[in-house]
Image: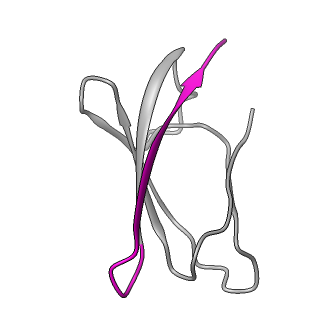
Amino acid sequence: DKITFKHLPPEAVIRVFSITGKQVAELAKTDRTVDYYEWNATNNDGQKLASGVYLYFITAPGGGKARGKFAVIR
């Protein structure tokens, strides 16, 4: 039950939203020695994400941005 975001710059911030637009998680990559972030697919309250489609937005210092979507199937 992990989702890995790869090829991230140092100090990237990942925000995850439900398909309805509600932010469910905000993740901050602080380890400068790796270019990925492993996430246990839990929301800000520590509960596992429900099945569904989610959107993510990644921002980094200096203006770098990326976005995408993923599905959780339980």
Q: Height in image: 69 above or below 52?
A: below
Residue at horizontal 57%, vertical 82%? 10
The residue depicted at 51 percent of the width and 80 percent of the height is 11
Residue 34 placement, left or right of 28: right
Q: Quadrant of residue 66?
A: bottom left
Residue 67: x and y, percent?
42, 51
Q: Which residues are magenta?
A: 60-74
Query: Where, quadrant-wise, is the N terminus in this rendering?
Result: top right
Q: Is residue 45 above or below residue 57?
A: above
Residue 2 image point, x, y percent? 73, 40
Residue 35 is situated, as x and y percent measured from the top left of the image, at: 70, 73
Vertical arrangement, residue 10 with respect to residue 67, above or below: below
Horizontal and vertical percent position of residue 7: 66, 67
Tell me what residue is drawn at x 44 percent, y 39 percent: 45
Colour scheme in use: one colour
Count of marks placed on residues: 0
Task: Find out whether residue 70 is within the magenta segment.
Answer: yes
Drawn side of residue 55 relative to residue 74, left or right: left
Using residue 22 as the reference point, say whether residue 67 is left or right of it. right
Quarter holding the C terminus is: top right
